[in-house]
């Protein structure tokens, strides 16, 4: 159930993110889960530039975004605007 795609690293108000080109509920046949107060989404395992990390796919404005922690951004040398290839899979 892994999915790989390329996107542009976007700046967010809490953390950077990458737009996801698919609907996780439709693609993986799973339902969103509570992530934190007031937010539902999809927990995932992700990998970018050889670095594996836990994250979430969250809906915003009828699209989905992969949240990328500042530590991952720093350790991989990414900057906002970078085009990156990422692999994600549901975190059962």
Image (tube, rainbow, N blue to C red):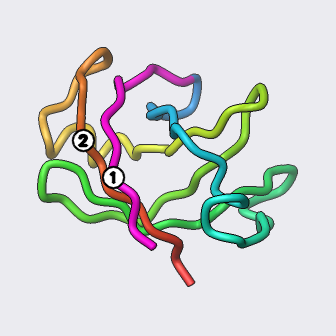
Q: Left or right: 52 with respect to 12?
A: left
Q: Categorize mark 1 by other alpha carbons within 10 Å: few (<14), some (14-19), many (20+).
A: some
Residue lying farthest to the right in this orientation: 38
Please state if 59 lies on the left or on the right of 74 as rendered.
right
Q: Which residue is mark 2?
A: 85
Q: Which residue is mark 1?
A: 4
**Does the magenta segment cover residue 46?**
no
Q: Quadrant of residue 37?
A: bottom right
Residue 68 placement: quadrant: top left
Q: Which residues are magenta?
A: 1-12
User: Is residue 2 located in the magenta-colored stretch of the structure?
Assistant: yes
Asked which secondary structure carries label 2, the reply is: strand
The answer to whether residue 19 is above or below residue 46 is above
User: Which of the image's four quarters has the C terminus?
Assistant: bottom right
**Residue depicted at x 30% and y 48%:** 86
Give the class, few, some or many, for how many residues have Cα within 10 Å of label 2's Cα (few <14, many ≥20): some
* Secondary structure predominantly adopted by residues drawn in magenta: strand
The image shows residue 32 at horizontal and vertical percentages of 77, 64
Q: In front here: 89 or 40?
A: 89
> Which numbered disc flags the more N-terminal residue, 2 or 1?
1
Check contact, mark 2 vs mark 1: CB within 8 A. Answer: yes
Classify mark 1: helix, strand or loop: strand
Q: Is residue 83 above or below residue 26?
A: above
Which residue is depicted at the point 64% across and 57% down?
24
Q: Position of residue 2 (x, y in %)?
A: 39, 68
Quarter holding residue 53: bottom left
Q: Pinpoint residue 49: horizontal percent, then vertical percent.
A: 14, 49
Q: Quadrant of the N terminus?
A: bottom left
Residue 27 screen position, x and y as percent: 62, 60
């Amino acid at each position: 159930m892994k999915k790989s795609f390329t996107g542009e690293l976007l700046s967010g108000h809490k953390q950077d993110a990458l737009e996801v080109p698919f609907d996780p509920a439709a693609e993986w046949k799973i339902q969103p889960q509570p992530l934190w107060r007031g937010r539902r989404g999809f927990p995932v395992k992700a990998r970018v530039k050889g670095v594996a990390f836990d994250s979430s796919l969250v809906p915003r404005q009828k699209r989905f975004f992969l949240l990328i922690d500042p530590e991952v951004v720093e350790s991989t040398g990414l900057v906002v605007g970078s085009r990156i290839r990422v692999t994600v899979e549901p975190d059962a």
